[in-house]
Amino acid sequence: MSERKVPKLRFAGFTDDWKQRKLGEVLLVRNEFAEQHYFKIDIELENLEPETGRLIGDLSIRTKTNSIFKKGDILFGRLRPYLKKWHLAQTNGLKSGEIWAFYSTDEFCRNFIYLLVQTENFLKIANISAGTKMPRAD
């Protein structure tokens, strides 16, 4: 009987056994909409600083979008994904349709997803895009 290998790298506080899952089981895409007047923040692609996860610029409501994200969602710029724009949402708000809002019901999976969208492997897949002039991850 072979001994089960347990990865040595673990999130702080994670003591459960490892489970192998397909990405689609833990990474969900938020497709929710709401009225603008419920929110004070609007994140557009230009508000995501490349490669840092930081927000920049004016975040006040500027567009007619009603696509929402929630606190804890991982925002990822799907238009020209090679620009490497991501952010871990600290509040609820509105977002551009050119930004995906990924979420997971599991906190450890959410942390994993946030790190995953920053990896070269994820970016390689995201850059297999639809469109040529304005490529979008699909």
Image: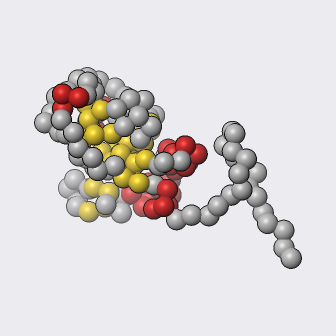
Tell me the residue at 42%/42% (across/down): 74
Tell me the residue at 39%/57% (across/down): 126
Q: Position of residue 55 (x, y in %)?
A: 37, 28
Q: Report whether 69 appears left or right of 35.
A: right
Q: In the current view of this chain or complex, which residue is farthest to the right?
A: 1
Seen from the viewer's position, the closer of residues 108 and 99 is 108
Is residue 137 depicted above or below 96 in this figure? below
Q: Report whether 20 appears left or right of 5.
A: left
The coloring applied to the image is secondary structure
Q: Residue 87 is drawn in which quadrant?
A: top left
Seen from the viewer's position, the closer of residues 122 and 103 is 103
Is residue 10 depicted above or below 122 in this figure? above
In which quadrant will I find the C terminus? bottom left
Tell me the residue at 27%/46% (across/down): 32
Q: Position of residue 27 (x, y in %)?
A: 45, 54
Q: In the current view of this chain or complex, which residue is farthest to the left?
A: 64
Tell me the residue at 43%/47% (across/down): 103
How many marks overall?
A: 0
Task: Mark yes or no: residue 115 visible.
Answer: no
Seen from the viewer's position, the closer of residues 86 and 106 is 106
Seen from the viewer's position, the closer of residues 46 and 72 is 72
Q: Residue 108 is drawn in which quadrant?
A: top right
Task: Mark yes or no: residue 38 visible.
Answer: yes
Is residue 81 depicted above or below 63 in this figure? below
In which quadrant will I find the N terminus? bottom right
Q: Position of residue 42 (x, y in %)?
A: 25, 31
Q: Position of residue 19 (x, y in %)?
A: 64, 61
Q: In the current view of this chain or complex, which residue is farthest to the bottom?
A: 1
